[in-house]
Image (spheres, rainbow, N blue to C red):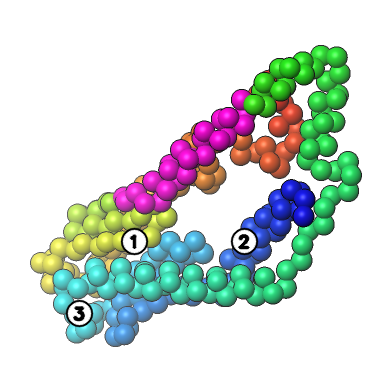
Amino acid sequence: MTDADHILDFRDELDREARAYSAAPTVSEASDASGTVSVAFDSDTRVLSVVVADRWKAAHRPGELGAVVVELVAQLAAERARQWGESVAEEDADQATTPLPSRGETPAEHVQAALADAGDSLDATAVLAQMMTMLEEVNAGMDAAMQIISARLSATHSAASAQGRVRATVDGSGAVTALVLDEEWLGTEAAADITRAINQAIAAAAASATAPVDPLAGTPLERYTGVIDDPSALARILMGKD
């Protein structure tokens, strides 16, 4: 198997996983055993809303409410992951490998054509030096990029509701990891107001945890994110134009 085959197989695997994630029959809502607390997710497993019913005190003590919500979030996330895994398995059973591009259509040949178009103005020594610099930057930046991405995902972000009665903590993906509520306030507040305060705190925390659309943004590899799918961009870098 050639290097091109390996690259295309890897791309196909990523495409299958992306399709499986999109096609998975997602669970979007879960409730506790009593039906008094429910959580709804969006397509990216971020909490859309929490609802606390009027009779919640018959099922839970005030000090338990936050933990109930966090547990429901964890259950939903686990179920979504299971469904995604099943969809990936189904995709693998019916996979089709992308054929190699015909000669003249590969990224490398597009780069070669772009360099050839430069004609006599092309400095081959400078291009080679730029290529070596690029490879060194990618190699040196890989570990740092992974550390930055990992730090983003593991970082926690906390925020409080408008009146400060509820404080939510989320991780870098926006998943709720902790929810602390004022127990004295819970004892006298209506369920609708508790619901509103919980959602305010979660939304505020999630807003501060928003990650870049491009995971490599802000990393040493940001410059090269468009190069893989854009041979002309790679040619410009090699010719020192970008």
Reply yes or no: does residue 144 show up in magenta: yes
Residue occupying image coordinates x 19% and y 84%: 58
Q: Which residue is mark 2?
A: 18
Q: Residue 194, how many percent across, how many down? A: 24, 67
Reply yes or no: does residue 139 show up in magenta: yes
Residue occupying image coordinates x 85% and y 14%: 120
User: Which mark is in front, 2 or 3?
Assistant: 2
User: Which mark is in front, 2 or 1?
Assistant: 2
Left or right of residue 209, residue 108 in this image? right
Crowd band around label 2 with a 10 angstrom C-alpha radius: few (<14), some (14–19), many (20+):
few
Q: Residue 117, how many percent across, how many down? A: 86, 24
Above or below, comparing residue 39 to residue 231 in the picture: below
Q: Which residue is mark 3?
A: 60
Q: Secondary structure at mark 2?
A: helix
Q: Name the quadrant containing residue 196.
A: bottom left
Q: Secondary structure at mark 3?
A: loop
Q: Which residues are magenta?
A: 133-157
Quick check: can you spot residue 186? yes
Crowd band around label 1 with a 10 angstrom C-alpha radius: few (<14), some (14–19), many (20+):
many
**Is most of the magenta stretch helix, strand or loop?**
helix
> Which residue is outermost to the front?
1
Residue occupying image coordinates x 74% and y 48%: 3
Which quadrant of the figure contains the C terminus? top right
Which amino acid, by three-letter code, is at mark 1? Val
Name the N-terminal-most of marks 3 and 1: 3
Alpha carbon separation for disc pair 3 and 1? 20 Å
